[in-house]
Image (cartoon, helix red, strand yellow):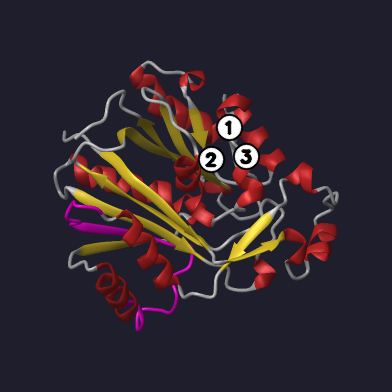
Amino acid sequence: MTPAYLTAPGYLLGEIEQDHHEIPGFAARAREYGMQPDARLWGWGKVRRTEKPLEELVIETGKTVIGPADVDFLVLCSTRFPGDAHTHGGFMETIMSGLGLDCAFLGLTLNRCTNLVTGLGVAEAFVRTGTYRNVLVITADRCATESERMENFALFSDGAAGCLVTARPGDYEILGSAGAQDTRTLDWGNEISADLSRQVNDILLTPHGLAPGDLAGVLHSNLYTPIVVMKERLAGFTLAQLDTANTARTGHCFAADPLINLVDRRTEPGGYYLLAASVPGSRAAMLLHKPTTAMS
């Protein structure tokens, strides 16, 4: 099997920054959810919104990622692609032209906020089997209405993130990707599951002789601080492995959070890192290793 690497991660946040209390209906939603009005407790801080169309977010993000390698496949992820079958052709024509690409592509959406990590796994499989050598993976999302910006588990920001999954040695070696799900609990009203996270840990870590405590960092979704800390600790991780700073700085950028958090973290040569995302009924993760020496 061909080795696979993740390289050139980058992200783009909505161009308009606002405080959490400026979100329309914020106080009413907090009361509706029975949430104590304590920003430090929840990690309430800033959110970012955009007036740009989704395709512009994709193009701008892709341009920060594409390097000298020739992209031969695109995996595009979003919780909600605009339009329908009548307009999706024009939507993709705009994106491909904007990125200067003329290659095959795949759209991925039903995995919700695990879309990006799931898409990275698809790209890894393509590279390992030799189907494609350089796969560009991008996720982009924006709230359809401002009333959707606050939920009982996160404050949502508009944004995008992307990277290249390639056969060429790069920033991180991909050691594997995995997912687990419980189809009985996929409904939005259920909680995210630490049990599924532990299943994924076993799949990814055990073959490499690793335990959760051996990881230098876990790059998780930016959900409210008590939720993400509780669930990730139940999955076997320690507070030192988590980083919740972006919960207040960027909010929850849909599926983009793990890659955003990887970009913002000072990673250590030789360190093992887990990109991870959970939604009710599903967990997806990718195990990365940062080489001890620069690879070329």
Q: Quadrant of the C terminus?
A: top left
Q: Which residue is mark 2?
A: 220
The spot of residue 277 in percent (x, y) is 51, 43
Judge left or right: residue 236 versus residue 57. right
Q: Is residue 80 magenta?
A: yes
Residue 108 badge: none
Farthest residue in the top direction? 209
The spot of residue 235 in percent (x, y) is 57, 29
State whether residue 17 is above or below residue 240.
below
Q: Amino acid at mark 1?
A: Leu
Mark sitting earlier along the chain (2/3): 2
Residue 58: which quarter of the image? bottom left
Q: Quadrant of the N terminus?
A: top left
Q: What is the crowding at mark 1: few (fewer than 14 residues within 10 Å), some, or many (at least 20)?
A: some
Residue 242 badge: 1
Asked if disc 3 and disc 1 are in contact, CB closer than 8 Å, the reply is yes
Q: What is the crowding at mark 3: few (fewer than 14 residues within 10 Å), some, or many (at least 20)?
A: many
Judge by depth and name the residue closer to the eye, 268 or 140. 268
Q: Is residue 190 in view?
A: no
Q: Is residue 159 in view?
A: yes
Q: Is residue 71 magenta?
A: yes
Q: CA distance from mark 2 to mark 3?
A: 9 Å
Residue 244 badge: 3
